[in-house]
Amino acid sequence: MIMTRAIALLFAAVAMLGAPHATAQVDNDLQRQVDALKEQVRRKDIDLQVLAAKVTDLEARLADCERKGEPKAPSEPEPTPGETPSPTPPSPAAPASPDAPPLIPADPLMPLPEPTPAAPPAPGAPTTSDDRAADFASPEAMLNAVRIRLREDFGARAGSDDPKERAAYQRELKPWTASTARSMRREVTWSVRLIEATSTRGGRIFVQAVVLDDAGSERGPCTIELAGAAAKAWRGTSIAGRRASLRGLATLELTIDHDQQEARPFRNDRFIGPCLEGRVIVTQAVLST
């Protein structure tokens, strides 16, 4: 009887000792599943934001086409009764297609006719997709595009000394800034030189970098936000002076300061116009060397 009770107590003790280990194993399995689900959600969120940026870009391009549409040609006046209408002049010949066969004159001794040169684009023509892509070639190009848009939309009011015009400009600047920031979002791939990194409590890393063109010249600074696996890959790594390939969603952060009328010292690259500064931030970023 005593031996049976001792054996039972021994099994109970073994079970109690093994329970924490089994519980820890279950907790580890659950944590891994939670981490995997979080990573799936993060990737889906990145895909949704990229799609939203593309939709915003298409909306901006449509707005540009509507805003900069070519004016319609005036209609020809109707002839007065009894008046003989003047003959319509012949339309100029269309430029020859590069794939069309060469023209052969009827007389072999006659020279070939000169091709009609293509007409240059009319002023105020709608912005093409190539123009939009050029606006995102670098942070410098993005800020220049906003400077041009500011001059087109506000003109002389942006730097006016008239109190009423200045007040109207400052009042309209906030909604204009929000609309412009929404339209200036696009997925980019840039070559960068890394400068320094700062870690946050949430596990994110903010990297200061300079974008380089194909010749290695600097084309403006940007702030890179690394999160999740992208941040883990660079945590604890010395980055100063390293070159890398950057892929992510380029966005604009526009800041309004009604007291600022000109560029600040050491920050002249951020100045957009009176009362307005900007900088480029790349989110959902991935850095590779």
Image (tube, rainbow, N blue to C red):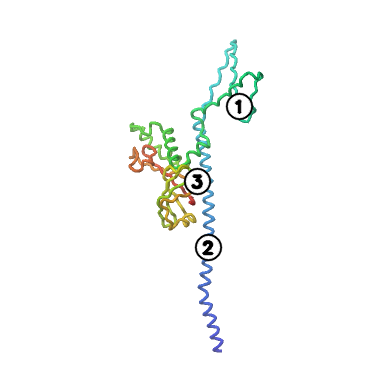
Residue 109's quadrant in the figure? top right
Which circle marks residue 96 in the picture? Answer: 1
Instruction: Give the residue at mark 3.
Output: 189
Q: In the image, residue 73 lies at what x, y percent?
A: 54, 23
| N-term-proximal mark, 1 vs 3 | 1
- Measuring 42% from the left and 46% from the top, which residue is drawn there? 210
| N-term-proximal mark, 2 vs 1 | 2
Q: In the image, residue 219 lies at what x, y percent?
A: 43, 42
Tell me the mark number nearer the camera, choosing from 2 and 1.
Answer: 1
- Measuring 43% from the left and 32% from the top, which residue is drawn there? 152
Mark 1 is surrounded, within 10 Å at the Cα level, by few (under 14), some (14 to 19) or many (20 or more) other residues, namely some
Secondary element under disc 2, as helix, strand or loop, is helix
Instruction: Give the residue at mark 2.
Output: 32
Secondary element under disc 3, as helix, strand or loop, is strand
Residue type highlighted by circle 3:
Thr
Question: Which residue ends up furthest to the right in the rendered image?
Answer: 106
Mark 3 is surrounded, within 10 Å at the Cα level, by few (under 14), some (14 to 19) or many (20 or more) other residues, namely some
